[in-house]
Image (cartoon, helix red, strand yellow):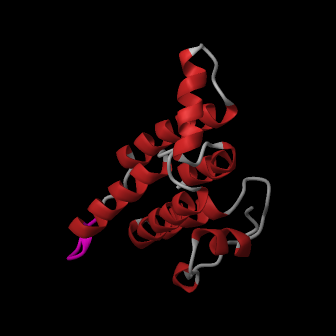
Amino acid sequence: MSILKEAEPLLEKSTASYIGTGADIAARAVGYGTEGANAAAQLKALQGNLVSKMPKMSGPQSDKDVQLYKEMAGQIGDSTLPISTRKAAMDTIYKINAKYASPEAVQQYAQPQQQAQQPQDDISQFNTYEDYLKANGGQ
């Protein structure tokens, strides 16, 4: 889940529209990389990493959760989508991770290294990934 933390600040820098992506492509044609294109490239790499580190899912809903997880991970690196859509995808990935991850992994993710604050144990009380971070001293 630390991949989501790494991706979050990149979303604000990334290109987030078809027109912006077109401008990135035009700039690339003359050998220039925009800040938005660079952030989008980093998000695409993290998107692949999210899929490769997908938690082991078991139970009756696991097949549907695997498919949803892959779809949402694919949206994070899509520079044609608005930032709000990609944040919603990150929230969904967070919820799926929280459903299948060990409590220790969830706690490690929510607690920044320099803080001694203990994360909330019951993650089901949070509606979004951002709510969870706010409650646990994250950004």
Q: Which residues are magenta?
A: 57-62
Main SS, magenta region, reads loop
List x then y, in percent, for residue 69. Answer: 36, 60
User: At x 20% / y 76%, what residue is drawn?
Assistant: 60
User: At x 78% / y 64%, what residue is drawn?
Assistant: 116
User: At x 65% / y 45%, what residue is drawn?
Assistant: 10
List x then y, in percent, for residue 15. Answer: 61, 42
Please give left or right for residue 62 compared with residue 32 in the image: left
List x then y, in percent, for residue 18. Answer: 51, 45
The quadrant the C terminus occupies is: bottom right
**Along the line of sight, which residue is nearer the eye, 81 or 53?**
81
Report the label total: 0
**Along the line of sight, which residue is nearer the eye, 27 or 129?**
27
List x then y, in percent, for residue 130. Answer: 65, 69
**Along the line of sight, which residue is nearer the eye, 39 or 25?**
25
Question: From what the image shows, is residue 100 above or below residue 72?
Answer: below
Task: State which quadrant residue 100 falls in.
Answer: bottom left
Question: From what the image shows, is residue 9 above or below residue 136?
Answer: above
